[in-house]
Image: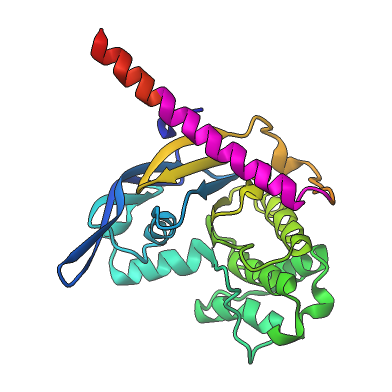
Amino acid sequence: MTTYSETSNNQPIIQICDGIKVYKRNEIETVALRGINCDFYTGQISVIMGPSGCGKTTLLNALAGITHLTSGIVVYKDRILQSMSSAELNHYRSHHLGYVFQSNNLLPHLTALENIYLGLEIADTLTSKQISRIKRLLIKFQLLDRAKHYPEELSGGEQQRISIIAAVANQPDILLCDEPTGELDSDSKKDVFNLLLSLLDEFPNTCIIVVTHDSDFIQIAHRVLYIKDGKISHIEENSNKTLQNQAFQITSDFLDTKKEKILHTIAELKELQYLLSQKIRKYEHDIE
């Protein structure tokens, strides 16, 4: 196990420093983030896991500049998001960021291809080079023959894969994914996993950050960040550093229900082990 400061000698592309977020409604305050610190790096899939209400989505939205921190900062490269103007934040989101939601967020009156083009057209960045790249992605992920279909004519997995291609169409530095497999069956999940892995071959300088309850994501992550009560409790590194450069094949039993439960239990036990070791060190220090 490592702490966030031990993760890499490279400069993170984005980081949150001492992030606190307090939501206020009438006289009631809810603390979502409690001085959170974490870094994220290019060429990696970082997975953020934790129970419901622990602050995962708040963290993701803070990285996107959607949620404004009560205190603390988010640093993208050498820029502090809190110091950006509205126009600069809009440029950051439209040119450097891709966002994938649990529900695919496709517009029903547009075809799959039109949904992919939409963000580029709004940002006025649709070029022939990007059109060629999008076509290559559609071919690579066996979606070209579905490009002229409307969302209701696509399966759930096809819709989500189209959403991911739309999110990376502008070659963002950072791809944020909020529960991207939450509404998918096992076969569709496999397709999304392999798509995310393949994206790092296609765009090796991309930083992929996934928020999820799904412990299967541990299998494709470079790093897993466990969040508890608004703080990172610990971080685990995947020992297979060349994971994303291999033809990763998820076997048919990978998503078996029993295995999924075992993986989830292992993740919980590892977190408990870490918390217990922290307690033991504290008590040992107290009696010295």
Report x, y in % for residue 203: 65, 53
Q: Quadrant of residue 62?
A: bottom left
Residue 267 lies in the magenta-colored region: yes
Magenta extent: 253-277
Asked if residue 111 is positioned above or below residue 72 in the image, the reply reads below
Q: Is residue 285 left or right of residue 248?
A: left
Q: Residue at x 55, y 77 (%)?
A: 119
Tell me if residue 222 can be seen: no
Asked if residue 134 is positioned above or below residue 17 in the image, the reply reads below
Q: Quadrant of residue 241?
A: top right
Farthest left residue in view: 27
Q: Is residue 244 left or right of residue 120?
A: right
Report x, y in % for residue 215: 62, 48
Q: Residue at x 15, y 68 (%)?
A: 27
Which is nearer the eye, 266 or 151?
A: 266
Report x, y in % for residue 238: 62, 34
Report x, y in % for residue 131: 70, 73
Farthest top residue in view: 288
Q: Is residue 284 left or right of residue 162?
A: left
Residue 82 lies in the magenta-colored region: no
Which is nearer the eye, 75 or 125?
A: 75
Q: Residue at x 65, y 29 (%)?
A: 239
